[in-house]
Image (tube, grey):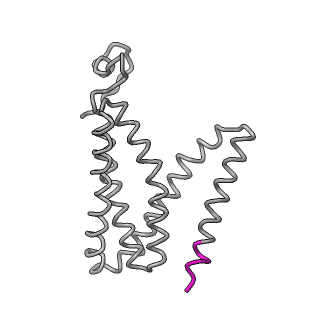
C-alpha cells in the first residue's frame, strides 16, 4: 500500500502500474478508503458536537456535511474504479467507509457529553479546516478558470452557498 514516487520513467513505481488499464493494483484506492474512513469518522464527531451545542446548528452542520460528501464520494468511487476495483466492490467500500460517520457521531455524542468544554474548540477547528481547504485548494483552482461562463458559474454557486446559509438562519430562528 505504500505510495512510491520516482523521477525516472522505468522505475518500480511506474512498472507496477498497469499500462493498458491505468490501474495501480488498488494502492491509491486503498489509501482513499483509509483516508475517507477517518474523514467520515471525524465528520460524525463534528455533527455530534454541533447537535450538542444546538439542534439547529446540528441540522445545518449535517446538511453542510452531506452536501460536501456527495461529490467527494463520487470522486472516491471514480478513484476506486481507476484503481481496478469493480463497480460493486467500489460501491461496497464507499458504503462501509461512510458508516464511519455514524460510529463517529455515536462515539462523539457520548464522549463529548462529558467533555462539554471541548465542543467550542472542536467546532472552531472544524470551521478553520473548511476555511483552509477553501483558501488553499479551491480558490487557486477557481483562478485557473477565467472564461466568462466559468466566472458566472462560480459567482452563482458562491451566492447560492451564502443564500443557503442565510435562508437556514432565517428558517431556524426560534
* Residue reaching furthest to the right: 148
- The x, y position of residue 88, in whole percent, is 30, 39
* Residue reaching furthest to the front: 88
- The x, y position of residue 165, in whole percent, is 59, 68
Left or right of 126: which side holds 107?
A: left
Q: Is 84 located above or below residue 132 in the figure? A: above
Quadrant for the N terminus, please.
Answer: top left
Instruction: Indicate whether residue 38 is drawn in magenta.
Output: no
- The x, y position of residue 166, in whole percent, is 63, 71
Left or right of 148: which side holds 138?
A: left
Residue sitting at 36 percent across and 21 percent down? Answer: 21
Quadrant for the C terminus, please.
Answer: bottom right
Q: Quadrant of residue 106?
A: bottom left
Q: Which residues are magenta?
A: 168-174
Instruction: Indicate whether residue 170 is drawn in magenta.
Output: yes
Residue sitting at 48 percent across and 65 percent down? Answer: 63
Q: Is 50 located above or below residue 102 in the figure? A: below
Residue sitting at 59 percent across and 77 percent down? Answer: 171
Q: Quadrant of residue 142?
A: top right
Left or right of 114: which side holds 161?
A: right
Q: How many marks?
A: 0
Q: Nearer the viewer, residue 53 or 153?
A: 153
Left or right of 6: which side holds 170?
A: right
Residue sitting at 30 percent across and 28 percent down? Answer: 4
- The x, y position of residue 131, in whole percent, is 53, 58
* Residue reaching furthest to the bottom: 174
Amino acid at each position: 500500500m505504500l505510495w512510491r514516487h520516482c523521477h525516472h520513467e522505468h522505475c518500480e513505481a511506474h512498472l507496477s502500474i498497469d499500462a493498458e488499464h491505468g490501474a495501480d493494483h488498488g494502492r491509491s484506492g486503498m489509501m482513499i478508503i483509509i483516508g475517507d474512513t477517518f474523514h467520515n469518522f471525524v465528520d460524525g464527531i463534528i455533527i455530534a458536537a454541533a447537535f450538542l451545542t444546538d439542534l439547529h446548528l446540528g441540522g445545518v452542520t449535517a446538511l453542510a456535511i452531506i452536501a460536501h460528501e456527495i461529490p467527494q464520494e463520487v470522486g472516491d468511487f471514480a478513484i476506486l474504479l481507476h484503481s481496478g476495483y469493480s463497480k460493486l466492490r467500489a460501491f461496497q467500500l464507499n458504503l462501509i467507509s461512510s458508516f464511519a460517520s455514524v460510529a463517529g457521531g455515536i462515539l462523539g455524542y457520548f464522549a463529548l457529553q462529558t467533555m462539554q468544554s471541548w465542543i467550542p474548540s472542536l467546532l472552531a477547528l472544524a470551521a478553520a479546516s473548511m476555511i483552509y481547504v477553501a483558501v488553499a485548494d479551491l480558490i487557486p483552482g477557481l483562478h485557473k478558470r477565467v472564461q466568462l461562463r466559468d466566472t458566472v458559474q462560480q459567482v452563482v454557486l458562491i451566492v447560492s452557498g451564502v443564500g443557503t446559509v442565510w435562508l437556514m438562519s432565517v428558517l431556524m430562528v426560534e
